[in-house]
């Protein structure tokens, strides 16, 4: 069903109603975070119990994000507090040593290789390569690279998982790419690939379902669909005004 407008209610009013409803939800979540923070400082829970509690709060945050259609400002504050709890539980966890920078020009004519049956992380990397490095780049799917190929998301590859970064995030950092569209894609890819609850974007569930629907496609078919998917997502997120719904 498509609704063009609600009689007697402006778009601004409708958005305000949605945000007001989510504000109450985020306030409740914020109180739960504060209670857990106090319990952690008082050492009332074991490490395992605290980790489980943080995971529950992450799931609650993800559920709210799926219905937070107009990006409530409270969402960012809640995410920061949850990240702080995560760091308190795992102070040593992090990206490790910095990702080594890579000049895009050095990879213009590179031949790339990654594992067969590409899923979200590798498909996003292929899109990034074709979007920012070489639109006609050669990408091969195999279990081992040839001497003149650049591997990614493979054992021993420079472009791979790096600390708590997925391969797409590693490649983004290495090439120094940063804009609104890339940041959105990076968060979506990270959550679908690692499922650590660090990012809670409402697009995750839908895109994850679409990707699983490609299970019977060939590698080349997955690549074509994946490049189109991420290109559309990138373009829409770069153009989307902040006050509009997703």
Image (spheres, rainbow, N blue to C red):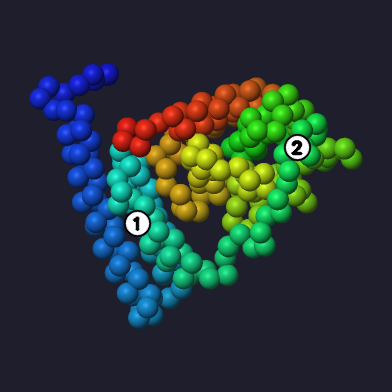
Q: Where residue 217 sits: x, y (%)?
A: 63, 24
Q: Quadrant of residue 70?
A: top left
Q: On the image, numbered disc 1 is attached to which residue?
A: 78
| Quarter of the picture holding the C terminus | top left
64 on left or right of 160? left
Q: Residue lying furthest right in this view?
A: 147
* 85 and 8: which is toward the camera: 8
Image position, residue 154 (x, y; %): 74, 45
Task: Report the side of 126 relative to 80 (left or right).
Answer: right
The residue lying toward the viewer, choosing from 122 and 235, is 235
Say which residue appears at 45% left-offset and 33% top-offset: 237
Q: From this viewpoint, which residue is outermost toward the bottom?
A: 42
Q: Is residue 52 above or below residue 24?
A: below
Between residue 138 and residue 219, name the one nearer to us.
138
Mark 2 highlights which residue? 105
| Point 53% across, 71% down: residue | 91
């Amino acid at each position: 069903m498509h609704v063009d407008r609600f009689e007697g209610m402006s778009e601004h009013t409708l958005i305000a109603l949605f945000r007001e409803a989510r504000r109450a939800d985020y306030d409740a979540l914020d109180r739960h975070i504060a209670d857990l923070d106090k319990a952690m400082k008082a050492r009332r829970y074991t490490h395992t119990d605290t980790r489980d509690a943080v995971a529950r709060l992450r799931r609650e945050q993800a559920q709210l994000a799926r219905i937070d259609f107009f990006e409530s400002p409270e969402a960012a504050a809640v995410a920061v507090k949850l990240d702080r709890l995560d760091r308190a539980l795992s102070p040593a966890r992090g990206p490790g040593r910095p990702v080594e920078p890579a000049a895009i020009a050095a990879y213009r004519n590179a031949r790339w290789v990654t594992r067969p049956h590409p899923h979200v992380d590798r498909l996003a990397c292929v899109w990034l390569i074709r979007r920012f490095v070489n639109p006609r780049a050669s990408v091969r799917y195999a279990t081992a690279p040839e001497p003149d190929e650049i591997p990614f998301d493979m054992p021993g590859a420079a472009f791979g998982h790096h600390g708590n970064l997925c391969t797409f995030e590693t490649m983004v950092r290495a090439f120094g790419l940063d804009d609104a569209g890339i940041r959105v894609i990076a968060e979506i890819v990270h959550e679908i690939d690692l499922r650590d609850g660090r990012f809670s974007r409402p697009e995750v569930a839908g895109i994850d379902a679409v990707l699983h629907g490609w299970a019977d496609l060939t590698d080349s078919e997955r690549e074509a669909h994946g490049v189109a998917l991420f290109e559309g997502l990138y373009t829409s997120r770069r153009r989307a005004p902040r006050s509009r719904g997703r």
